[in-house]
Amino acid sequence: MNSISLLLLRFAGLFGLIGAFIGSHMAGSQGGAYALRPIHAHILVVGWLSLFAWAAFYQLFETRFIKLAKTHAWTAIIGTTGLTLGMWLYMVNPLELAKGFTTVFYIVGGTLVLVSFALFFVLTFLVQPSRKQ
């Protein structure tokens, strides 16, 4: 479980750094970058906060369902990346990609985040307190 916890913790740190950078950019741009507000919020709440909480969860609890836990972690990481990157492509569209592509990218990322939350909910019934406590 330590490897899953560490993986989630590192990605939480990455999303936290990106979210803080976007917030700093918005503050310094004097109004020009406020289209990034929803992206900034989702990176910090879904990416930094949720992944950090799940990293702590895997330190506090043990499960025998390692494949399920790894699937949870990777759907969370890939989903958060897809959701926030898809949101940026959809809302800002700096690469002028087709609207259909950006919409699907955004939806698939968001769906993976939902899957990760559902897996987490299931995992809460399949754990026991860590022996480290």
Image (tube, rainbow, N blue to C red):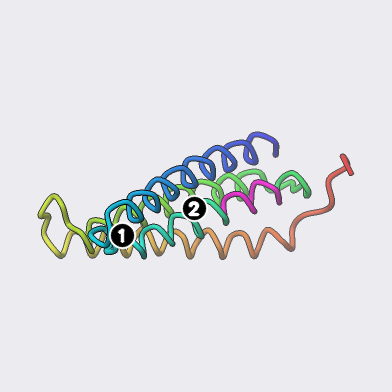
Write the residue at 11% across / 59% down. 98
> Where does residue 39 sit, x and y in percent of width and height?
36, 59
Q: Is residue 38 left or right of residue 125?
A: left
**The quarter of the displayed image where residue 10 is located:** top right
Q: Is residue 128 left or right of residue 93?
A: right
Residue 35 included in the magenta stretch of the image: no
Q: Is residue 131 left or right of residue 68?
A: right
Q: Amino acid at mark 2?
A: Gly
Write the residue at 17% across / 57% down. 93
Residue 54 included in the magenta stretch of the image: yes
Q: Nearer the viewer, residue 42 or 115?
A: 42
Q: Nearer the viewer, residue 44 or 126?
A: 44
Please give the label number shown on residue 47. Answer: 2
Dot 1: element: helix
> Where does residue 45 sit, x and y in percent of width and height?
51, 60
Q: Is residue 82 above or below residue 31?
A: above
Of callouts 1 and 2, the N-terminal one: 1
Query: Which quarter of the figure is the N terminus placed in?
Result: top right
Q: Nearer the viewer, residue 10 or 98?
A: 10
**The quarter of the displayed image where residue 104 is located:** bottom left
Q: Which residues are magenta?
A: 50-57
Q: Residues within 10 Å of mark 2 (few under 14, many from 20)?
A: many
Specify the principal SS of the magenta part.
helix
Please give the label number shown on residue 36. Answer: 1
- Which of discs 1 and 2 lies nearer the camera? The answer is 1
Dot 2: element: helix
Write the residue at 54% across / 45% down. 12
Q: Is residue 41 above or below residue 15?
A: below
How many numbered callouts?
Answer: 2
Q: Residues within 10 Å of mark 1 (few under 14, many from 20)?
A: some
Query: Which quarter of the figure is the C terminus placed in?
Result: top right
